[in-house]
Amino acid sequence: MVRIDLGDGRCAYGRQLTGVAVEFFDRVGAAGELVDLLELVTAPVAFTIWVADRAFRRSGGWELLDAVTLSQEEASRTYRFAKQDAISRRLSIYTTDPVSGTYGETPASLEECQGLERAAVWGVVHVEDRLRDHFDGRPNRWVESMRLRP
């Protein structure tokens, strides 16, 4: 679990799942507040994305709190992300299965990709921007820049 200082007296929370998948909770807190991590992981999830693993290092900028063991369901959850080839514009869904250790892509339509996060590894600064925008109820420029194009 990590606490992410949003730079304006607020903080956000995230939890590394399997691989580089990270869920960010739809809960804003006050910087430095005490939080019950077992209660926090029951909060709604704002979004789940891939994040560069350096975010979870002591020097990564995010405050490392403690580990909260994933439930069996969380540990076996399959993740799906939308991909679009930059040249051909073909769409696919990238699926990871932590139980079998398999992953792969399947061709998809625009409709099948709707509502899925883009397959991209986010950096710390971009995640922080997205969290601030999420809590302030405004569009995020990084999400907009990755929007699927017909």
Image (cartoon, rainbow, N blue to C red):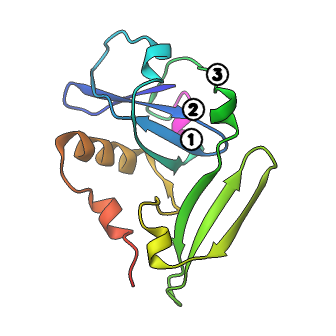
- Nearer the observer, 52 or 59: 52
Structural distance between the alpha carbons of marks 1 and 3: 20 Å
Q: Is residue 124 above or below residue 12?
A: below
Mark found first going from the N terminus, 1 or 3 = 1
Which span of residues is magenta-colored?
54-59
Residue under pointer 3: 69
Structural distance between the alpha carbons of marks 2 and 3: 18 Å
- In the rendering, at what x and y percent does residue 66 appear? 55, 17
> Quick one: label 3, few (<14), some, or many (20+) residues within 10 Å?
few
Q: Quadrant of the C terminus?
A: bottom left
Q: Is residue 92 above or below residue 49?
A: below
- Between disc 2 and disc 3, the foreground one is 3
Residue under pointer 2: 57
- Between disc 1 and disc 3, the foreground one is 3
> Residue at 33% of width from left, 60% of height from top?
142
> Residue at 62% of width from left, 34% of height from top?
74
Horizontal relation, residue 123 to residue 78: left or right: left
> Element type at marker 1?
helix
Structural distance between the alpha carbons of marks 1 and 2: 5 Å
Horizontal relation, residue 45 to residue 27: left or right: right
> Quick one: label 1, few (<14), some, or many (20+) residues within 10 Å?
few
Q: Name the kind of residue labelled 3 in the image.
A: Thr
- Residues tagged 2 and 3 counted as in contact (Cβ below 8 A): no
> Residue at 51% of width from left, 79% of height from top?
109
In magenta stretch: residue 55: yes
> Element type at marker 3?
loop
Residue 131 disc label: none
Horizontal relation, residue 96 to residue 7: left or right: right
Q: Name the kind of residue labelled 2 in the image.
A: Arg
> Element type at marker 2?
loop
> Residue at 54% of width from left, 27% of height from top?
58
Q: Residue 5 falls in which quadrant of the image?
A: top left
